[in-house]
Image (tube, rainbow, N blue to C red):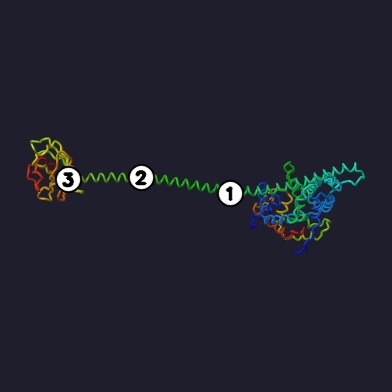
């Protein structure tokens, strides 16, 4: 399709007003597009009209002679073969000359066609180069878009990593808070000896009111007699009697869970009870603590 | 404008013979074309001696390049006009590069060729001249001025715009519109 821009280029091309590079591009268009070639022909006819409007003027007569003599010197020899001289010996050089002339003429003709061929290849090459330039430009644009997308992606990945790091830190903080909170729920009680026989005996109770579980460790508490057991008690104001947390072996860490729900572990106490323990404390209290 | 379509073009046949190396056909073409082409060269170059050199150069070009003429693209006359016009412009630009300057040439002989057909210079105007005159009358004065300067002066686009005191885009548009009108009216009639 012919646009105004093409018409403008064609007008400028016909008048030799295009810069050399643009003119070469446009010649490639002419070679590739019959519609453009027809437009150029139309415009050349218009331009020729301007020339045709100039009044003719006779050139100096001697000029014709100069031009004709120059072209005759270049005219193919076959066009100026002299008449037969009637002698084979004389004709032979002419025949050789004629053959050479034909050969030269043939070569010139061949050369001319080769030149036309080369010109058409060059024009095609220009058109292909132009197409290549367009493709390369498009490729560059796409590459730039891709680079921008990759850069954006990298920035997003970096942002994500930053956010992940923040999230991890926050999770750590939350975990620490949970741990601190959990520790805050645990009550630690140190039980001191009330017995003159084992004045250095000591026990530590860790009690978790949420889970209603605890751990007991003792130190320098001697083993009970064979018919006795140590028994741990939890004093909760909500109960009239201490609540049993079970019997234990003083040589080992004891994990306990009271038989009744404890709302407030006010004190812990250890007594020596009959073997197997008692429902309520009956033996002497040997250790107590808050 | 209705002008009868031309029959088989005798100049195309002459060109075909010239392409085959026929010097008599070439001589015939010289007889037919040299006055109109010499007139054009004198108009552009403003120097009869240089116009002679350009005429010789142009006819030698035709002798060597007649085979490149394509009848389906243009008439032989259009083809010849454009060859000689371009050779004259090349000389004009070379002269400018040598320092003589286009301004001097155009000042010596104003490029008002489009109005030349209005002058009575004793030229015998035939049917073709009347056709051209009518075609030129159809384009505006601005278009004629821009085309005239572009065709004869050898100036660049910018120089033409400066000379006319008009924006470059306007000058291009005037040239485009004017040439299209002339081309539409005259294609196949020269």
Q: Is residue A207 left or right of residue A284?
A: right
B178 versus A204 height, above or below: below
Work out whether disc 3 and disc 1 sit on a shared chain.
yes
Residue B116 location, quadrant: bottom right
Element carrying mark 2: helix
Task: Quote the CA–CA distance across marks 3 and 1.
Answer: 81 Å
Say the numbered circle drawn on residue A166: 2
Q: Which mark is residue B114?
A: none
Query: Subunit of mark 1?
Result: A
**Spot occupied by residue B176 in the image (x, y as percentages of width and height):** 68, 55
Question: Which chain does tag 3 point to?
Answer: A
- How far is the residue under mark 2 from the one under mark 3? 40 Å
* Residue highlighted by disc 1: A135
Q: Is residue A160 left or right of residue A21?
A: left
Q: How far across and how far down the image is residue A37, in percent? A: 69, 55
Front residue of A222 and B135: A222
User: Disc 2 or 3, which lies upstream in sequence?
Assistant: 2
Q: CA distance from mark 2 to mark 1?
A: 46 Å
Q: Crowding at label 1, few (<14), some or many (≥20) Cα neighbours within 10 Å?
A: few
Disc 3: which residue: A256
Q: Which of the pair A143/A248 is nearer the observer?
A: A248
């Amino acid at each position: 399709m012919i646009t105004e821009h093409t018409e403008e280029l064609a007008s400028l091309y016909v008048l030799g007003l295009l810069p050399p590079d643009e003119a070469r591009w446009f010649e490639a268009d002419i070679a590739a597009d019959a519609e453009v070639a027809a437009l150029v022909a139309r415009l050349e006819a218009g331009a020729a009209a301007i020339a045709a409007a100039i009044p003719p003027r006779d050139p100096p007569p001697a000029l014709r002679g100069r031009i004709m003599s120059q072209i005759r010197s270049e005219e193919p020899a076959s066009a100026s073969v002299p008449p037969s001289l009637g002698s084979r010996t004389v004709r032979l050089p002419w025949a050789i000359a004629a053959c050479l002339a034909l050969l030269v003429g043939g070569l010139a003709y061949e050369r001319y066609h080769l030149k036309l061929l080369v010109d058409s290849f060059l024009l095609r090459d220009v058109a292909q180069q132009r197409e290549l330039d367009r493709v390369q430009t498009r490729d560059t644009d796409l590459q730039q878009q891709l680079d921008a997308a990759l850069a954006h992606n990298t920035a997003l990945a970096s942002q994500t990593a930053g956010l992940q790091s923040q999230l991890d830190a926050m999770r750590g903080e939350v975990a620490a808070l949970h741990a601190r909170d959990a520790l805050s729920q645990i009550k630690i009680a140190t039980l001191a000896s009330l017995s003159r026989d084992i004045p250095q005996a000591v026990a530590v109770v860790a009690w978790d009111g949420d889970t209603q579980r605890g751990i007991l460790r003792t130190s320098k508490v001697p083993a009970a007699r064979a018919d006795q057991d140590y028994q741990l008690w939890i004093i909760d104001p909500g109960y009239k009697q201490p609540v049993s947390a079970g019997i234990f072996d003083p040589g080992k860490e004891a994990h306990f869970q009271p038989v009744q729900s404890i709302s407030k572990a006010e004190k812990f106490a250890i007594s020596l009870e009959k073997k197997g323990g008692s429902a309520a404390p009956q033996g002497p209290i040997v250790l107590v603590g808050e | 404008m209705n002008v009868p379509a031309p029959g088989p073009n005798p100049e195309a046949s002459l060109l075909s013979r010239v392409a085959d190396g026929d010097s008599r056909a070439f001589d015939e073409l010289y007889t037919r074309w040299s006055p109109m082409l010499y007139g054009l060269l004198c108009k552009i170059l403003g120097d009869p001696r240089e116009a002679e050199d350009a005429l010789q150069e142009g006819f030698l070009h035709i002798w060597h390049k007649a085979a490149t003429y394509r009848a389906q693209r243009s008439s032989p006359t259009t083809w010849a006009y454009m060859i000689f016009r371009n050779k004259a412009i090349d000389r004009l630009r070379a002269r400018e590069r040598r320092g003589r300057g286009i301004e001097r040439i155009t000042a010596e002989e104003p490029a008002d060729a489009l109005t030349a057909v209005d002058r009575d210079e004793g030229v015998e105007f035939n049917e073709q001249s009347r056709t051209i005159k009518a075609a030129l009358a159809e384009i505006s004065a601005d278009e004629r001025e821009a085309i005239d300067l572009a065709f004869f002066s050898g100036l660049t686009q910018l120089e033409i715009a400066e000379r006319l005191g008009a924006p470059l885009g306007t000058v291009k548009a005037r040239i485009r519109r004017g040439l299209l009108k002339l081309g539409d009216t005259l294609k196949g009639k020269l």
